[in-house]
Amino acid sequence: LELPQLRLGDLGEENLRACCEELGFFVLANGIPEDVVARATHIARRFFVHNCKSSCRSRANIPRGYIGVNKESFAILAGEQRPNDLVEKMRMGPPAVSAELMAENPYFAHPEAAELLAPNVWPQDRDGVGAELKEAFEALYYCFESVAEALLPPMERAFGFEEGTLVGALDFENRERHASILSANLYPSLRGRKVKSGQLRLAEHTDVSLFTLVLHTDDVETPAGGGLEICPPQSTKWFRVPDSKHRFVVNIGDCLAYWSGGRVSSTRHRVSLPENGDEGDCRLSFAFFVTPRYDAIIRRLPSSVNVSDALDGADSDSGEEMTFYAWRKQRVRRALQALRVQK
């Protein structure tokens, strides 16, 4: 499946609207300097084979630090029970958030802040991996953030929001307040690994974010198939998305689909295994989940379609206000309810 290709700075509101209404996915020319991506890629690969990664696990309520293969399943986001995903991750949030800030600043000391914000956790080692990883990932985070910031105004115009609605929800003037997450995802080789029935590299799900930016590294090769697949709205068929080196794959999240009154689609997607039993090589990608402040006000636009059955946290009618924290809590609760029904 060839995704629509757009260019930052020349998106075209009609093109952007059409992409997001029909597929909820599009390809965007990469606006991040190659040297920033190359450095982050190099140190990420070094980190994932280094024994220091176990030193940066986190018990925060929100994803931070390292998590190993087979430790979590994105199927929970879809309210489904499946084997855990064949991926290991290193995740971070806003670089400026610290333990001191969380304790002393009233905005960050609020109980709801702890559900969406937490200090980052970096590896402790004598080889300099942790220091280099922190520097490279923070630089990459800020670059992703700049791309997200540039996308918000055209999205407001294309989807019918008042000017400043989405921009204010992220509040880039106070960059430590939005809850966006950068995740380095390493999909390991399957050589010698026992794969369970129904297990994938990432299970079928939709994202909880406003939207997500995914950047494949230059050395991704998938001759045996596998990789990102999407199931378009009103379809039951899965389509493979070709790797887009030097470009972002952008997908709309549940929050924006809800907020827009269903004008845009949060499309199911997954990362499949290599085909024909081929064990494949490992893959590395970076995903940036663009997420509002916990206290950002969401006032849903009038619904253009019936989205009542979606796991979008839609317990309110158009025009009713709720914070992002409250919307996210509803969204998670609906997924857990669906999970209990399955059991």
Image: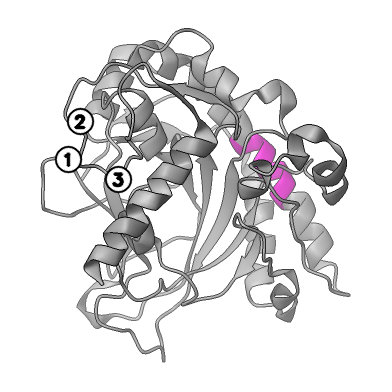
Q: Amino acid at mark 2?
A: Glu
Residue placed at 23% from the left, 67% from the top?
342
Q: Secondary structure at mark 2?
A: helix
Which quarter of the figure has residue 158? top left
> Quick check: 180 above or below 220?
above
Q: Position of residue 8 (x, y in %)?
A: 47, 23
> Label 3, on which residue?
311
Q: Position of residue 324 (x, y in %)?
A: 51, 33
**Is tag 1's residue or tag 2's residue first in the polypeptide sequence?**
2
Q: Amino acid at mark 3?
A: Leu
Q: Secondary structure at mark 3?
A: loop
Residue placed at 32% from the left, 35% from the top?
314
> Quick check: 315 above or below 159?
below
The magenta region covers: 137-144
> Label 1, on which residue?
233
Queried whether the magenta region covers residue 139, the answer comes back as yes
Q: Amino acid at mark 1?
A: Pro
Q: Is residue 119 visible?
A: yes
Q: Are marks 1 and 2 in contact (CB under 8 Å)?
A: yes
> Label 2, on which residue?
22
Check the picture and name the quadrant holding the N terminus.
top left
Q: Position of residue 332 (x, y in %)?
A: 42, 50
